[in-house]
């Protein structure tokens, strides 16, 4: 089968990748569309020593699996858990000690014609959700994870740092809580997309230090981290949503003195994400900048790496 293969930080289009064989309890999924994520770009930069097909945001059609999913559009949670470790027994499969992760850890990903995932990881896409919109399910679920970890309501001041793909989704989901929200970015066009939805935006110089209860860092760079950190009041909560390819230097003493809670946040709940898409409470189509066929996947990645670009999709059907 065709797919985008990463090896030694070099991405190439291959046509001779073996079609995966689903193990017991798994389904074979024909990929219809997949989205390029910042994590994919970081893998190319060496964030994690992965070799194989990358990609983890996808919509597909089940070709082998249980009857209720056959020939149905699905999206899939990316962590394939063992079911036996302490985290699995605690009901936290995203931290399974033996997990594989689609397109990231020991499991070929979505930038190929086929993939396999455990049946329990798959969720049927509602009929009224387009394939374009459904491709955003995984990152939208990641945005919703913040509200699984931190209680946010209308009485709190919340700052989102970053106007990129993830920052846009985080901002839209947090806005639904009614909190006093401000989104900081560097691109007027991206901020305008949020302003059209009634979300307050600005540049870094509009942030008053020590003025927010919660700050969500979505840039993955030191400047974004510093802005988020200094924005917090004492006993504030700092949520880190981005992976960092390099090392991050921070003032640990200030975290202690101000009793700041630092929370890492990644994968999230798929069912609420699909419900928001079905109810059209989140606008994702406006985040699509381009759509390429898989055979032009290398061009798609060149496009995705350009500054200011939002979501680039790959179509396989």
Image (cartoon, grey):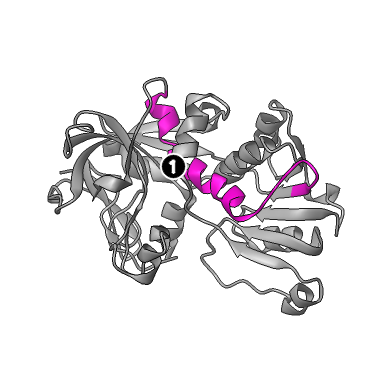
| 81 left or right, relative to 304 | left
Q: Which of 297 and 201 is in front in this view?
A: 201
Residue 60 location, quadrant: top left
* Label 1 secondary element: helix
Q: Position of residue 293 (x, y in %)?
A: 31, 33
Judge whether residue 38 is colored magenta: no
129 up-or-down from 262: above or below: above
279 up-or-down from 111: above or below: above
Judge whether residue 143 is colored magenta: yes
Q: Which of 259 and 245 is in front in this view?
A: 259
Q: Nearer the viewer, residue 128 or 287?
A: 128
Q: Which residue lies under the disc numbered 1?
A: 270
85 up-or-down from 103: above or below: below
Quadrant housing the N terminus: top left
Q: Which of 152 and 189 is in front in this view?
A: 152
Magenta residues span 129-158
């Amino acid at each position: 089968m065709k797919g985008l293969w990463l090896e030694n930080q070099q991405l190439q289009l291959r046509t001779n990748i073996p079609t995966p064989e689903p193990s017991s309890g798994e389904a074979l999924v024909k990929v219809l569309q997949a989205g390029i994520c910042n994590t994919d770009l970081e893998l190319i930069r060496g964030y994690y020593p992965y070799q194989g097909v990358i990609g983890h945001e996808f919509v597909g059609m089940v070709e082998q699996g249980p009857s209720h999913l056959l020939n149905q559009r699905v999206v899939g949670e990316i962590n394939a858990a063992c079911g036996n470790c302490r985290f699995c027994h605690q009901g936290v499969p995203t931290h399974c000690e033996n997990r594989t992760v689609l397109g990231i850890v020991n499991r070929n990903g979505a930038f190929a014609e086929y993939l396999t995932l455990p049946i329990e990881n798959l969720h049927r896409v509602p009929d009224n959700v387009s394939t374009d919109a459904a491709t955003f399910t995984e990152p939208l679920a990641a945005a919703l994870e913040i509200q699984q970890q931190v209680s946010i309501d209308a009485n709190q001041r919340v700052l989102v740092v970053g106007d990129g793909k993830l920052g846009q989704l985080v901002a839209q989901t947090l806005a639904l809580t009614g909190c006093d929200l401000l989104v900081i970015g560097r691109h007027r066009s991206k901020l305008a997309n949020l302003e059209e939805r009634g979300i307050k935006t600005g540049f870094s110089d509009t942030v008053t230090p020590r003025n927010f209860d919660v700050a969500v860092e979505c840039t993955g760079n030191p400047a974004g981290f510093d802005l988020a950190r200094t924005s917090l009041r004492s006993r504030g909560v700092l949520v880190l949503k981005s992976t960092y390819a390099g090392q991050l230097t921070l003032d640990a003493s200030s975290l202690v003195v101000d009793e700041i809670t630092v929370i890492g946040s990644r994968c999230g709940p798929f069912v609420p994400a699909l419900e928001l898409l079905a109810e059209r409470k989140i606008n994702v189509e406006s985040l699509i900048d381009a759509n390429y066929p898989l055979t032009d996947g290398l061009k798609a990645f060149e496009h995705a790496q350009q500054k200011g670009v939002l979501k680039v999709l790959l179509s396989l059907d």
